[in-house]
């Protein structure tokens, strides 16, 4: 019941909110306030080094037939500042960011040359009042969601330790919601997201930890899983809460996160891959959409002042996704995902596509404002 071909549009839109590339050779410099073109190749990404002035930049990323490279990340130490994923041959995308002075790593996994240098020069512009308000609002949301995640995961772990399978299943579903709502923030911390949320096959079996091996134990074997798994899960969500308190986001990154959440829907929720044992995929879908809405709400005043029509259109598209999900709601949860027909998943996919398109334009509008 996968619908990969029908989801290319949503995936491409999600990819359009990503960062530049590294790879093939030579330096490329550009002035502030411009578009930088980046090409994905099997050798990596071109150019492999960038020297840019601080300030708003739009990166235009295109895959020139590369089969080995479909992703690009910009790293500040081990933290991902931004990324583009699932850019298959022939696809392209755009991403806007307000760059600050410093040295960063450009990472293109799978290429012959995986890492390159991004040097940002000049002085950082001070944040406007609108940008500060947006960052503060979204920061409060993320901190509230991680606090909820810690609390609900503790309830989940206690139910597991007690061997109460029914209670553990209920607690599992509740704990997934706050995590899915802030998934791009969790992903920005490198290995922390795979430790918490990797699916079977995403990492070597010896390193598979987090929610999903416990999900498998509960729904496939009817057991609570190992004490090691639940102890590590609790440790990792507490560590996520600690790191979130140190994060410093600017409006374009917040906007990017909203589209990344929709990309998560098209990449692993609509296909039924994420919750492959519990089939709670629609719980995750709603949480991703709610997280995207919270991110947009944080920057919506900036968007409305620049393009009122776009802001109105995005609000209408969020309402459209809500309507698309409504038939499958049962109380405070949803029907099991395999009960959806191909027609059902196609309709839901179209509503996500319709929202992702205007939402993908927000990053460029708020960058540098």
Image: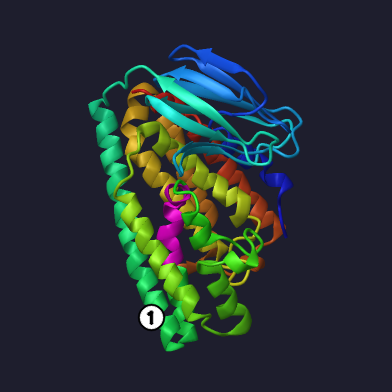
Above/below status of 100 relative to 210: above
Does residue 218 appear to the left or right of 342 in the view shown? left
Q: Image quarter for residue 156?
A: bottom left
| Residue 267, position as x, y percentages in the image | 62, 50
Magenta part mainly helix, strand or loop? helix
Query: Tag 1: Cα neighbours inside 10 Å, few (<14), some, or many (≥20)?
Result: some
Please state if 181 lies on the left or on the right of 137 as rendered.
right
Residue at x-position 52% and y-position 14%: 29
Per the image, the residue denoted by label 1 is 158
Q: In this rendering, would 73 be left or right of 339?
A: left
Q: Is residue 179 magenta?
A: yes
Q: Which region shows up in magenta? A: 174-187
Please provide percent x and percent y for residue 84. 57, 37
Task: Give the tally of numbered discs.
Answer: 1
Which part of the image, by quadrant, shows the N terminus? Answer: bottom right
- Give percent across and percent down for residue 308: 38, 26
Among the 4 quarters of the image, the one containing residue 114: top right
Residue 42 point in image, percent of width and height: 73, 33
Secondary structure under badge 1?
A: helix
Rendered residue at 60%/41% (across/down): 85
């Amino acid at each position: 019941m996968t619908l990969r071909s029908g989801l290319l549009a949503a995936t491409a839109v999600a990819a359009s909110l990503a960062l530049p590339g590294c790879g093939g050779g030579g330096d490329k410099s550009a002035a502030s306030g411009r578009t930088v073109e980046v090409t994905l190749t099997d050798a990596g990404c071109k150019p492999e080094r960038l020297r840019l002035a601080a300030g708003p930049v739009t990166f235009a990323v295109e895959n020139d037939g590369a089969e080995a490279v479909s992703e690009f990340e910009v790293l500040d130490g081990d933290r991902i500042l931004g990324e583009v994923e699932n850019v298959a041959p022939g696809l392209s995308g755009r991403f806007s960011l307000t760059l600050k002075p410093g040295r960063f790593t450009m990472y293109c996994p799978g290429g012959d040359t995986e890492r390159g240098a991004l040097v940002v020069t000049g002085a950082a512009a001070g944040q406007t009042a609108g940008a500060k308000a947006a960052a503060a609002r979204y920061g409060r949301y993320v901190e509230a969601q991680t606090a909820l995640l810690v609390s609900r995961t503790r309830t989940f772990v206690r139910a597991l330790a007690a061997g109460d399978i029914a209670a553990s299943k209920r607690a599992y579903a509740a704990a997934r919601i706050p995590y899915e709502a802030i998934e791009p923030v969790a992903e920005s911390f490198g290995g922390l997201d795979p430790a918490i949320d990797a699916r079977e096959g995403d990492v070597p079996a010896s390193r598979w930890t987090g929610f999903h091996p416990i999900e498998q134990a509960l729904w496939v074997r009817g057991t609570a899983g190992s004490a090691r798994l639940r102890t590590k899960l609790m440790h990792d969500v507490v560590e996520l809460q600690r790191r979130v308190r140190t994060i410093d986001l600017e409006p374009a990154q917040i906007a990017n996160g909203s589209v990344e959440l929709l990309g998560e829907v098209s990449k692993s929720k609509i296909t039924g891959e994420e919750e492959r044992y519990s089939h709670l995929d629609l719980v995750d879908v709603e949480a991703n959409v709610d997280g995207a809405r919270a991110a947009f709400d944080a920057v919506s005043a900036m968007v409305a002042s620049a393009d009122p029509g776009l802001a109105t259109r995005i609000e209408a598209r969020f309402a459209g996704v809500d309507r698309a999900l409504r038939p499958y709601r049962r109380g405070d949860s949803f029907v099991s995902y395999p009960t959806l027909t191909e027609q059902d998943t196609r309709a839901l996919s179209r509503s996500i596509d319709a929202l992702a398109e205007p939402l993908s334009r927000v990053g460029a509008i708020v960058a540098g404002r």
